[in-house]
Image (spheres, helix red, strand yellow):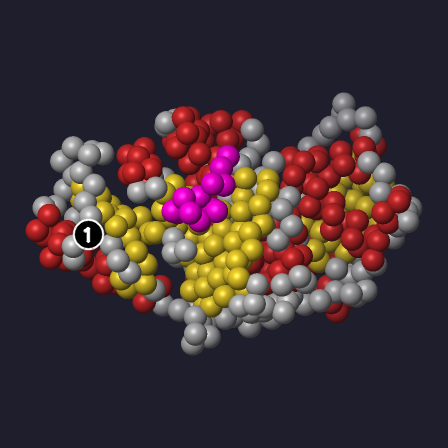
Amino acid sequence: MAKIAILGYGTVGGGVYDIFNNSSFLKKTGEEIEVAKILDIRDFPDHPQKELFTKDFNDIVNDAEISVVAETMGGLHPAYEFTKSLLEAGKSVTTSNKELVATYGPELLTLAAQKGVRYMFEASVGGGIPVIRPIASCLQANDIERIAGILNGTTNFILSEMIDKGSEFEDALADAQQRGYAERNPAADIEGHDACRKIAILSSMATGYFVDYSNIPTEGICNVSLNDVKYAEKLGSAIKLIGYSQQMPDGTLYACVAPMLVKKSIPLSGVCDVFNAVMVRGNYLGDAMFYGRGAGKEATASAVCADVIDIVKNGAAKCPILWETDKIKMMAPEEKEWSYFVRTSAGKEQINEMFGDVELIDDVVSGEVGFVTSLIKEKDFVQAVNKLGGTYIKVLEA
Ligand code: HSE
């Protein structure tokens, strides 16, 4: 019998409990897995196993029978202190906490390796989608050249509602919150911070170096309007919030999070609702896409549980340090070339003078036009568009 504990009985923690309570993994692992304790500051007097709950972390860290702990609290503190104590006490930890992994991943991975236990975080990116493990194992023969992903279910749900139903942003957000997709503070979703942490984790996995999320320029979807969505449709594209990173030939890494126009010929454009997808480009493999439910109780909990099952089945001995504590050198974002979709009320002559002979769309909003530029360095583009006046969105390259 493997005894485990859960830290945080919220949406994901509740899902982890349900999975282990409702399913037997005896055949898969050779032993039953039992939730022995649950830490939460709240009371659950009506829970069928209310005796499992404790408010005292010491009850878990000092319980010699508990070998694996699922940390589903979210946030940095006290999740960081608890995780560190658990690893130091020789317990493996699995987590869905992207903020913690993106911030303290290298330190916690190193500590786990020193202690001969594991720190696993499949659920931290893409909810239930297997993407961390494939990068860590199946794609090892490749240099990962580029990652482009829809990494936030809430914003993808909101954008899908805007595209498919013409919903206003606020209504779609309220719906996402009601369904349990959104973070407690929706700013983390709609301002792109959640996707930023996830692309930082994936980029760290891909490069083997620490990619500090605070160095990733991040823009959310708060400024995307229904008219932008209509223009995108005219251009045979959909607007998606994309977490993007690319290894540059000089060894630096470029990364950003931004709403982008994605051509319908690129599979990411068809990823709708709460679904996430990560396109990984390997130098031998080419593009591979990992697709599935990126948020929600059961999907995310299933990935946390899979890590627990892996540890129970295979033991904690093999604990690779997946990336170094050294930070990778980032490319100056203003040097990166993109195509841009621009909306402006400027005249054709001025547009042509600055951006060449671009094709103008003039039947979406009266008094303005939309067009797509050719590839141009961000700094040159920003300078030009500031003179022209207007709004813009990056275009994802194929
Ligand atoms: N709020 C996150 C999302 C949850 O919407 O994707 C999963 O990380």
Name which residue lies at 71% across and 67% down.
Answer: 320
Question: Residue 180 lies in what quarter of the image?
Answer: top right
Residue 148: x and y in percent read 48, 54
Residue 120: x and y in percent read 70, 55
Question: Residue 282 lies in what quarter of the image?
Answer: bottom right
Q: Nearer the viewer, residue 35 or 147?
A: 147
Q: In this view, does 71 lie above or below 115?
A: above
Name which residue lies at 43% across and 60% down.
Answer: 255
**Left-right relation of 166 to 197:** left
Q: Which of 70 and 250 is in front in this view?
A: 250
Q: Nearer the viewer, residue 219 or 274?
A: 274
Report helix, strand or loop for mark 1.
Answer: loop
Q: Which residue lies furthest to the front in this view?
A: 265
What residue type is disc 1 on?
Answer: Val
Name the residue beneath numbered marker 1: 358
Name which residue lies at 47% across and 41% down.
Answer: 270
Q: In this view, does 393 lie above or below 367?
A: below
**Left-right relation of 308 to 207:** right
Residue 249: x and y in percent read 43, 74
Q: Which residue lies furthest to the bottom in this view?
A: 250
Residue stretch in magenta: 262-273
Q: Does the magenta stretch include residue 379?
A: no
Q: Is residue 265 magenta?
A: yes
